[in-house]
Image (spheres, rainbow, N blue to C red):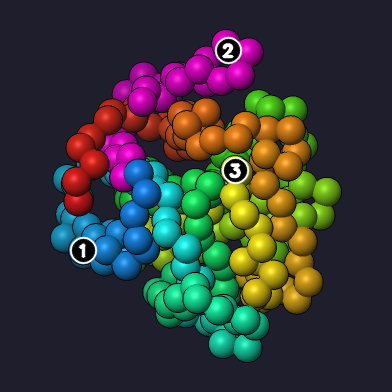
């Protein structure tokens, strides 16, 4: 999946600048949350200054995750969906089929990017992806993520250890949104949630993955190379 992946209308995403750093892309398909979480922890703990950055794409089995500051009171009626306390920032969110989860495993020190700018660029990648389907999205002050007409379509939950990122973004493409009604999404009671398919966007992840990855690559000056899906 190259960084110059085609976007709707046939126009390629912008190419990374000459001398761009290589990032290995792993498309993990659909997987349960815990093994992927443990794998990105292990990758981050083991990496050194010479370790190539990686981007992991995954579609998770249904799960609610609570960040380090997460409050159990924001999980209203989990039912048969498991609830996990994890080591990212933020409150509670839902992952499930029809949602792209992207874990950028980046060395921010090497890229010369601060944490605030990292968050801004990740949000911008989702905003630019939506724009390719003529969906206007924006940020909201004090509530990280991406919104369309006030409804959240992309969530962020990150962790930075020794200048290296793990966890990442969740981008609603074509999913059952009912589980979001069982929580206060990101800690906000009654927050509306939407998905691309409900806004005239695609009905599957395959159309969106290369576009999202292409925008992330462009915004961070990365040259993306495919890597095996094993962890």
Q: Residue at x 20, y 51 (%)?
A: 231
Secondary structure at numbered mark 3 = loop
Q: Is residue 104 magenta?
A: no
Give residue 123's position: percent from left, percent from top. Answer: 60, 47
Earlier in the chain: of badge 3 and badge 1, it is 1
From the viewer's perspective, is the residue at label 3 or at label 2 nearer?
3
* Residues under numbered marks 3 and 2 in contact, where contact means CB atoms less than 8 Å apart: no
* Quadrant hosting residue 19: top left
Q: Residue at x 57, y 39 (%)?
A: 125
Earlier in the chain: of badge 2 and badge 1, it is 2
Residue named by callout 1: 42
Within 10 Å of the Cα at label 3, are there few (<14), some (14-19), or many (20+) other Cα atoms? Answer: many
Give residue 190's position: percent from left, percent from top. Answer: 78, 71
Give residue 33's position: percent from left, percent from top. Answer: 36, 63
Residue named by callout 2: 11
* Residues under numbered marks 2 and 1 in contact, where contact means CB atoms less than 8 Å apart: no
> Which sits in the foreground, 16 or 172?
172
- Residue 184 sits above or below residue 104 on the image: below
Q: Is residue 30 left or right of residue 210?
A: left
Q: Identify the magenta region.
A: 1-28
């Amino acid at each position: 999946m190259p960084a110059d992946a085609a976007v709707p209308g046939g126009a390629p995403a912008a190419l990374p600048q000459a001398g761009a750093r290589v990032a290995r892309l792993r498309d993990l398909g659909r997987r349960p949350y815990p093994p992927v979480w443990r794998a990105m922890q292990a990758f981050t703990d083991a990496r050194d200054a010479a370790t190539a950055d990686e981007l992991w794409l995954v579609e998770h089995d249904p799960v609610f995750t609570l960040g380090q500051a997460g409050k159990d009171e924001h999980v209203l009626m989990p039912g048969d969906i498991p609830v996990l306390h994890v080591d990212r920032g933020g409150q509670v969110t839902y992952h499930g089929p029809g949602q792209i989860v992207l874990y950028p495993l980046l060395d921010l020190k090497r890229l010369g990017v601060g944490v605030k700018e990292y968050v801004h660029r990740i949000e911008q990648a989702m905003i630019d992806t939506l724009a390719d389907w003529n969906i206007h999205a924006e940020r909201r002050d004090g509530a990280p993520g991406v919104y369309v007409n006030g409804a959240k379509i992309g969530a962020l939950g990150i962790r930075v250890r020794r200048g290296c990122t793990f966890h990442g973004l969740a981008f609603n493409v074509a999913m059952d949104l009912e589980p979001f009604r069982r929580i206060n999404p990101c800690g906000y009671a009654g927050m509306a949630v939407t998905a691309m398919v409900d806004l005239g966007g695609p009905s599957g992840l395959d159309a969106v993955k290369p576009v999202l990855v292409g925008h992330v690559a462009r915004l961070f000056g990365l040259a993306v190379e495919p890597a095996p899906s094993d962890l």
